[in-house]
Each structure stands twice: as structure tokens, then as C-alpha cells.
Image (cartoon, helix red, strand yellow):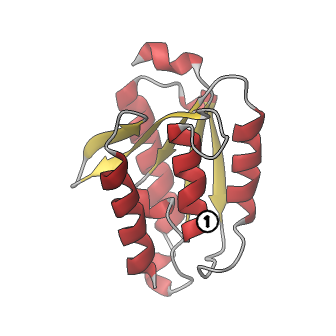
Amino acid sequence: MKNLEKYPIFAYLRKSTNKKEQELSLIQQEEWINIISEKLGFNINNVKSYTETKSWFENKKRPMWNKMMKEIDKLKTPCILIAHDTSRLSRNPKDNLAITDRLYWDNWYKIKIKRIYFLWKGLKIHDWDSKTNKKILTDKLKQNYDESL
């Protein structure tokens, strides 16, 4: 995995709600990002984090998400993206499309995301890249969005 550290590495964290039970959500996500980075051999100091400290309803803009996407689009080489789980990334159909465009070289976007790492079924690190079955990936993103409604 060390050879992947030559790519810019971004982490995205987002609160789901402003409810009391979500108070520690960002702290927990940050801990998981650190664990994922450590297990993959990434230096945590090389991971640039974007954190939404406010929960946004599905049709609202996510300022840190948008900032991260602009940063990704400026890159000369594709990046690595880390999230606690895929539901952090999926908030609305527009953002789901932004992921697939940059992962699969769709809609005139060159590949800007080399790989996405996240936790799957507990503590197992899973990843998506341009070789991931696109239907499975898009179905999962849509499922995440549907569950958020």
C-alpha cells in the first residue's frame, strides 16, 4: 500500500444529524480514518481532511464536500479518498454522480479518484476503484441516499 501514498490522500467526515446520539460522530469517524490510514500504511499527516460539522439535509449544499471536490478536480494525479463508511459520501444523487464521474472517467471527467477506502461489515477495510463493478457501487450509493431520507 505504500506505493499509494504517492497520491494525494483526502478524508471526508460528515455528521448525519444534530441529535444527541450523534454528538461524538465526528470524533469516532476521525478515529476510524486514523485506523484505516495506519492499517494502509499512510502517514496521517499526509491526509487532508474535510469535515462537515453541521448535518445537511439532502437538498442542501455541503460546503466542505464542494471544497474537496474542487480540490480533487485541480489535481494532476488522481487521489485516494478515505471515509468511515460509504454513507458519509452519499448524501444526494448529484454527489453520488460526482463520485462515479471521478472514479470511472465519466461525463468528461478524467479519473480523479484512484481509490476509495472505507470500512465494510465491521472493521474490515474495503475499497472501490475504477475496476469495481459500477452497478454494485452505484446501487450502494443510491441505497445510502434512500436510507438517509
Viewer-closest of 89 and 21: 89
From this view, report whether residue 60 is shown above or below residue 4: below
Q: Position of residue 134 (x, y in %)?
A: 37, 47
Q: Position of residue 83 (x, y in %)?
A: 47, 50
Q: Position of residue 74 (x, y in %)?
A: 78, 34
The N terminus sits in image quarter: top left
Viewer-closest of 31 and 88: 88
Question: Is disc 1 placed on a helix, strand or loop?
Answer: helix
The residue identified by callout 1 is: 94
The picture quadrant where one finds residue 44 is top right
- Rendered residue at 41%/30% (across/down): 38
* Disc 1 packing (10 Å; few <14; some 14–19; many ≥20): few
Viewer-closest of 37 and 141: 141
* Numbered marks: total: 1
Amino acid type at mark 1:
Lys
From this view, report whether residue 13 is shown above or below residue 70: below
From this view, report whether residue 42 is shown above or below residue 102: above
Viewer-closest of 109 and 129: 109
User: Which residue is outermost to the front?
Assistant: 107
Q: In the drawing, does residue 86 fall left or right of residue 44?
A: left
- Rendered residue at 70%/48% (across/down): 68
Q: In the drawing, does residue 123 fall left or right of residue 66?
A: left
Q: In the drawing, does residue 133 fall left or right of residue 144?
A: left
User: Which residue is outermost to the top?
Assistant: 3
- Rendered residue at 72%/72% (across/down): 61
Q: Position of residue 121 (x, y in %)?
A: 21, 55
- Rendered residue at 61%/82% (across/down): 57
